[in-house]
Amino acid sequence: MTTMTSMSIDTRMKLFNRICAGVLIAFALLWLVPLAWAFDTAIKPNEETTKTTWWTDNPTFSAFSRIINETDIIRWFGSSLFIATLTAFGAVLTGSLAAFALSRMRFRYRNVVFWVVLAGIMVPSQVLIVPQFREMDSIGLLNTFWAVSLPQIPTAIAVFIFKQFFDGLPKELEEVARLDGASFLRIYARIIMPLARPAVAAVAIFTFVSSWNDLLWPLLVLSNPDNMTMPVGLATVQGTFGIRYADTMASALLGAVPLVAVFLLFQRNIVEGIAGSGLKG
Amino acid sequence: MTASQTALPTRQAIDDDPPPPRPRGQGLPAAGFLTPFLLLYVLFIAGPALYGLVMSFFDTSMVKPGLSGFAGFGNYAEALQSADFWSPLWHTIWFTILTTPPLIVLALVLALLADRVKHGRWFFRLAFFVPYVLPSAVVALIWMWLYTPGLGLIETALTKIGLTSPNWLGDPGWAMPSLAVTTLWWTLGFNFVLFLAGLQEVPRELYEASSMDGAGPWQQIRSITLPMLGRTLTLVAVLQVIASLKVFDQMYIMTSGGPNFATRSVLQYVYDSGFTNFRIGYASAVSMLFFLVVLAVSAVWFAIVRRQEKEV
């Protein structure tokens, strides 16, 4: 009798799991529809996009080449790549150095510094746009990549993620090196940072993606069309295509490609990064 | 303090070099390590935050140098008495109400489902998470096309099953729900991944033990999974509320705050006051009021987490 009930529970479980999988697949496919439809629209000739069918007899990539030739999308790509790389590099470097001091050194006011940094997590960057703009204006950095990147570099979250990771590394690692008279800088560069690859990856990818996707701040400080970032460029030209829907979708997809590539390359780091920083934070 | 001072001489006696004045003083190298971060932090975060606070008490203008005349609480009083402040604040809260429950519930349900499926997790992660890494401008362009009256995929699909669809972004009543649906599609993946990670922390043995006791899948979810997810749930809820309150991009690109200002968000109001009307003192005051709202949400979260920790 015990085997009977356990079997029926087993079959119930199996059935339940089947249903789960079915519902999940349905949702996942639904979630892919907008991107699929955007691609479908982009490979139609512009005249055919008003027909609202998925099928086209004349698939073409000409919309993509038109966007590349007619807009500054390559330039926007360059600006975004430069700004996002600079920001990610700066955030990793300054964040890990500060976290190393907070995790490994003894000095007065250490807790004060830590709490001051932590308070920064509370302030949404959007609250600061007005004074930051004024500051950039007065030091003459408006319309430069520095104006976009510099305020995004000191992220409290980066310090927090690095500190948590460093705290988890055993102190014995560097004790020998300390006895040999190695400097802190050497310990940081030769022992700690090589071990901190997962934290570096998480911080670098997150600052890269959020810097790349930011709209409000670069929109304010980069008014010159020559150095617009990808989101600002796309938002600015969106109205100019009119009913050329294939072209509009081609521009959106070209804007999506770099981020999708980053995601596919670093899928595991991204997911682990979210899980690690989010849950323990 | 006295303990460490009495302990020090013996330690110094062991060292054969002359004792440094402060043996534990790692202040200098620490300052070196902290300076790059703190310098940028003070220059671009803490400094502007204080400057913004000061400006909010003045009639500062974008087109004039300096702070201009002292306004006291004038800017705050003006904002609190103005319908132009309350209506964007209400829109932002309305957007938060529309987006937060589905973004939490649907993400949780999908994560619970994905946790039971053994194969092809990468596919679900891909489907739900890829939209999250896209720039808002890309998301906006795609969804504006989906919502296009007469040609959009959504209207076509609804017409096929015999429904008439409203002018999604053009109707003041429908514009906000439409933006909420777009946001659901865009950011669901983030919560999904957080929940999935939380579910992986639930010990498998608990499930096995309860199946032995004859618990069905439904009972397992109710009595094991959800209670174990408590902390993740509060975290996701707070992050979601804050993220929704900070909405700007979707409205700016898809509706420009329209139709008839029906979707103007608080941040767009700050933007309009400061960068269109040049009243940056007033815009700073609005920013500070908005900051207080976010701070209140964080405080509630902190209180809840405190209580949860005490219960455990």
Image (cartoon, rainbow, N blue to C red):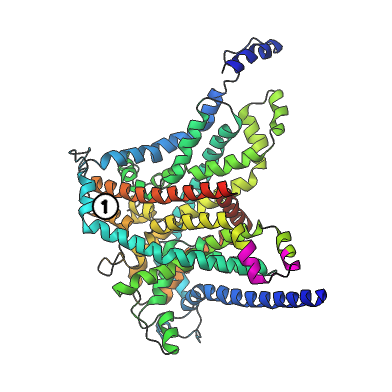
Q: Is residue B20 above or below residue A157?
A: above
- Residue B138 occupies which quadrant of the picture? bottom left
Q: Residues within 10 Å of mark 1 (few under 14, many from 20)?
A: some
Q: Is residue A35 magenta?
A: no
- Residue B55 occupies which quadrant of the picture? top left
Q: Which residue is mark 1?
A: B275
Predominant SS along the magenta part: helix
Residue A26 position in % (x across, y down):
57, 77
Residue A103 position in % (x across, y down):
59, 34
**Foreground of the two, B12 or A224:** B12
Q: Residue furthest front?
A: A1
* Residue depicted at 48% across the width and 44% down the height: A155
Report the side of A69 relative to A103 (left or right).
left
Q: Is residue A112 visible from the viewing direction of this image?
A: yes
**Foreground of the two, B50 or A234:** B50
Q: Is residue B213 magenta?
A: yes
Report the side of A91 relative to B82 (left or right).
right
Magenta residues span: B210-224
Of helix, strand and loop, which one carries label 1? helix
* Residue depicted at 42% across the width and 44% down the height: A151
Q: Residue furthest left?
A: B69
Residue type at mark 1 is: Phe
Residue B156 position in % (x across, y down):
42, 85
